Image (tube, rainbow, N blue to C red):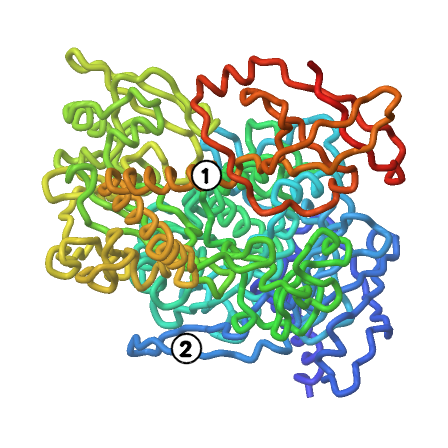
Amino acid sequence: MAWARLLPLLLLLLLLAAGPGLQLRPGFQDRSLLSSYEIIVPQRLARERRAAPGSSVAQAQDKVSYVIEIEGKEHTIHLEKNTLLLPKDFTVYSYNEEGKLYSENPDVRDHCHYQGYVEGIPDSAIAVSTCTGLRGLLHVGNVTYGIEPMDDDSDLKHIVYRLENVQKEPMVCGVSSTDPGREPTEYEQPPGMTQLLRSKRAVLHQTRYVELFIVVDKERYEVQGRSEAAVREEMVHLANCLDSMYIMLNIRVVLVGLEIWKYQNLISTDGSAGDVLANFVQWREKNLVTRRRHDSAQFVLKKGFGGTAGMAYVGTVCSKNHAGGINVFGQMSVQMFASIVAHELGHNLGMNHDDERECYCGADSCIMNSGASGSRNFSSCSAEDFEKLTLNKGGSCLLNVPRPDETYSVPFCGNKLVDTGEECDCGSPKECEKDPCCEAGTCRLRAGAECAYGDCCKNCRFLPGGTVCRASNNECDLPEYCNGTSQFCQQDFTVQNGYPCHNEEAYCYNGVCQYYNAQCQAIFGPRAKAAPDICFAEVNSKGDRFGNCGYHGNDYRKCSTWNAMCGKLQCENVGALPVFGIKPATIQTPIGRTTCWGVDFQLGSDVPDPGMVNEGTKCDAGKICRHYQCVSVSVLNYDCDVDSKCHGHGVCNNNRNCHCDAGWAPPYCDSTGYGGSIDSGPSYNDKDTSLRDGLLVFFFLVLPLLLLAVLAFARRNQLKQSCGRLISRCRSSNSRSHRTPPPLPRPPVETDRRHFQQSTPYNSRGVPTDVQANQRPVPAYSVNQYHQHYQPAYHQPYYHPLQYQEQLQQKLPTRPPPPQQGQCIPSRPAPLPPK
């Protein structure tokens, strides 16, 4: 039984031999690389919210709390399930041994990834997975901790460590002239995180959504024991960490798809990081863009590139051919790796490195520092860079709010995500105070509101169909219109790649007319232009930082004669350097009577150089630049004959449909219409009745009035004669009706015989018998006759005007006014006329 005595010793030796292997669990932290850590046992609190009647158990566990001890202090952490992390149609792609693509949609309703905060500590943040214990990041104050279980089969004992205590090889993703191993420099105490977050949220007041797609290479799949489930959980945990980092910039990260290469890599991973990145974005453009909608794709691979942790293009997040990056996942935890992916994704979002800039993030290092430090904080410079991207109309796809049917979410009103059954979500009650369209607490539209958000929503109403929601910004871009029934703008469409532009001296490429002069002017000012071809051939044949055709391994690649026009951009007539707020290094190369200007932006080895000739630039007759090579334009697969397909009245968009000119109707521009395409939305408002109303007013009011005016002008002489006769008749009638009626005879008035003689008798015509013929009589009547009707009209004799004038010149008889005695004055004869 000697073997029985040796058995305990053999078991001990086996355990000692297996010990290091247990510590090297993929995705977990190797404890041998920790300068210090502590072992804790988290205590779960039994005060999760109670399940509502009829709700599932999973819904009852949407919120959990734990008590943990870190560095001698007890902390209570509150966690809530990240409902925005995975869409309802989250898809995992893979290939079988024959190379045939297949997909599956795993159930994501009961995922175990949470975010939260530390009770009583402002600006704290947590992103953890509870699938096998607590595993993730805890940001407390200005310190970031990692936490993970000690063993896969135990959720009791955990290790907690500061990320800064992880010993790692220096890895860079930044400026080549910067020493990646240098210590952070001392700087003034930055503003607190609360102030930093407030300033960033003020800049980025509208939430953006990054729809992320992750591709995992074969070697990383094998590291996880060829377990597809393990890889999936690891990448979901990675996305949760990314979302917790970007949320401080008001950016949410949604993992929309995952692809795992089980049997072979579909691209070559040989060569430099730049070579692999170029291979990956080419594969993405050809295979992935048309399969699954996403804003950025990140390639996760095991192979390293010396001291380079990753590489990505800058400001290309919505590009169909450059929105990607590569990330090296070596011997490190997911928490550490998340900072690398956040860094490369930040480049896609327009963020440059923080080195040699006055930036602060509330910690010793920031995510966009050149060295992979494991930080989880973005700096003020990163927020400013992203703001510039959005102000320059970049990142338009980030405004696409995930639709309720695309995003899985346990109904939670107030998460600023429109879940199934919600009409809007303006956030917390305080955030909703200034929202006139959405009701807080109910996530329903207010009375009378049609919408609450979107490019085609204004003042809580749908913008009319035909309203431009995304204008064309150059001759290779196409406008999009609102349809009048949705708050969302149509998808962004451009002219099909390969269509001639700039007077047929260039080609459209991804919505931009690419030619040398435009790129020189963008870098060196409006007077700059492309240098002669001899400059490109001479400078780019050297193979240095100022003249090359990309990288080959760790060295610059020299340009061959036929590819020299696709290397470093060479310009002349340079007056200034107004370049993106970045101070580049320039070189002047005199060749003959010409000075060739080149530029190096020094953005680092992980960033493609924007001083290279843009892809799609016409480098020769019928040729364009692709990946630093001058190749036939046929690689763009342009197949649109605008004369036959669009009848000469439009162009083809990147969906290969006709976009018609104004006055012609889609889909083939062969009939009259309002322009646009079947993809861009209606270019006119079919509910706008202003034109119809205007035509009705014109034909039934304005036109008849005009015809009457013309008719009146044509017959003006006849009308004038007719009006003259009518006026004469009116005047004669008026003259007869206005003649003074004859005076009525007055009865004799008794007079006081003491003063007056008896009145002279009147003849039959009412005229005194003793009055001469040329004298006018004074009518005699009683006071009561004022109130009686006139007698029948009396016709005066006609007098000649001269005779009548003489009569007026004579002195007519007068009499005193009657006494004011009312109607009781006795009748009396009229006084005698004066002699």
Instruction: List the residue tagged with mark 2.
Output: 103
Residue drawn where x is 66% and y is 84% of the image:
3
* Disc 2 residue crowd, few under 14, some 14–19, many 20+, Cα 10 Å: few
Snapshot quadrant of residue 10: bottom right
Q: Secondary structure at mark 1?
A: loop
Residue type at numbered disc 1: Asn
Q: Where does label 1 land, which residue?
A: 392
Question: What is the number of callouts on the image?
Answer: 2
Seen from the viewer's position, the closer of residues 480 and 483 is: 483
Residue 228: which disc?
none
> Viewed as shown, does residue 507 lie left or right of 328?
left
Across and down, in percent, residue 241 comes to 62, 58
Q: Is residue 72 above or below residue 763?
A: below
Residue situated in front as seen by the camera: 1 or 298: 298
In the displayed image of the protein, which residue is found farthest to the top?
A: 593
Q: Quadrant of the C terminus?
A: top right
Residue 343 lies left or right of residue 835; in this view the side is left
Sooner in the amino-acid sequence: mark 2 or mark 1: 2
